[in-house]
Image (cartoon, grey):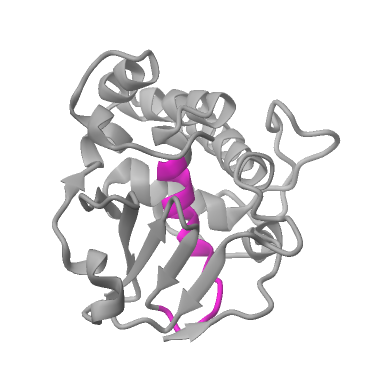
Amino acid sequence: MRQSINAKPFSQILAEPVPLEGRWAALAPGRVVARPAVRRVGEAKLSTAAVRVLAGLAEGTSVVRSPARADTALVVDVPNQGGTDSFLFRTRSKQLYGTPKIAQSPDAAALFAAYLLLGRVPDFSAAYLELLKGLETNLPQVELDGLMASAADELVLACDIDLGLDDQPVETVWFYFVSPTGDAVSEFTEAGLILTPLLREPDTLSDYLAGVAGEFDQIKLPRL
C-alpha cells in the first residue's frame, strides 16, 4: 500500500479522456455540455471519466456496498479489462483506498457519486434520478446522451463544491496499490449493505431522496 503525497485536484483527474464503448460511445471527451451543472459558471466540457462511472452505477456493472462500521465506509467494485478494481472510502476520516497501481484513479468517482446520493445533495441527485428515469422509459439514445452529459457534469462540480476534492491541500488522504485482503482495510472483504437498488431503481432513489423511511436510512454519513 502506498500513499499519494501530492494529490491533484480531482477535477483534473476527471478531465482526462477515457474511451467509452457501447451505448455511450457517441459521447466524446471535451464536448460542450448542452445543459451544464446548475451551479456551474461558464461553459462545461464533458468528462467521459464521469460518464464511465455513472454508466457503471446506473447499469449495475459496478457494485457498491456499505460495511457496518462506526466510521461509515463505502466500497465499490468496478470491472476493468477483464478484472475488477476496488475502492474504499471512509467517510468520516476521509481516507480513500484503491487497488489500482495509479495514485488517483478516476473510477474512484463511483464512491463519491454514491456518497453524494446518500447525502441527498440536490443538484447531482436530481440529474442522476432523471437519468435513471430516462433509462427505465427507454428514451431515444440522443436524449439519454444529454441526460448523461448533464449528470456527469453535476458529478464533477459536486466533487469540487460539496466534497472539496479540488481544495489544496486536499483533505482526503489517498492510498493506492492496496491489497483488498490486507488487515489494514478489512472493509474490502465485508459484505455490508448492497446499494444497487438505490443506485439503479428510480422509484427507490426517488423515495429515498424524498425522505421516505427505508433500509438505506441505516447508513449514517457525516453531514454534507
Q: Is residue 11 magenta?
A: no
Left or right: residue 165 compared with residue 45: left
Q: How many marks?
A: 0
Residue 81 sits in which quadrant?
Answer: bottom left
Residue 199 locus on image (x, y percent) = 32, 37
In the rendered image, the quadrant that contains the N terminus is: bottom left
In the rendered image, the quadrant that contains the C terminus is: top right
As drawn, 82 above or below 163: below
Residue 118 sits in which quadrant?
Answer: top left
As drawn, 95 above or below 202: below
Left or right: residue 164 compared with residue 74: right
Q: Which residues are magenta?
A: 100-115
Residue 109 locus on image (x, y percent) = 50, 55
Q: Give the residue drawn at x 26%, y 49%.
A: 66
Can I make out residue 19 in this image?
no
Q: Give the residue drawn at x 27%, y 76%.
A: 83
Q: Is residue 108 magenta?
A: yes
Q: Give the residue drawn at x 37%, y 81%.
A: 178
Can I make out residue 155 in this image?
yes
Residue 45 locus on image (x, y percent) = 74, 47
Q: Main secondary structure of the magenta part?
A: helix
Question: Furthest-left residue in view?
Answer: 191
- Of 54 and 194, nearer the camera is 194
- Of 20 and 123, nearer the camera is 123
Residue 137 locus on image (x, y percent) = 33, 21
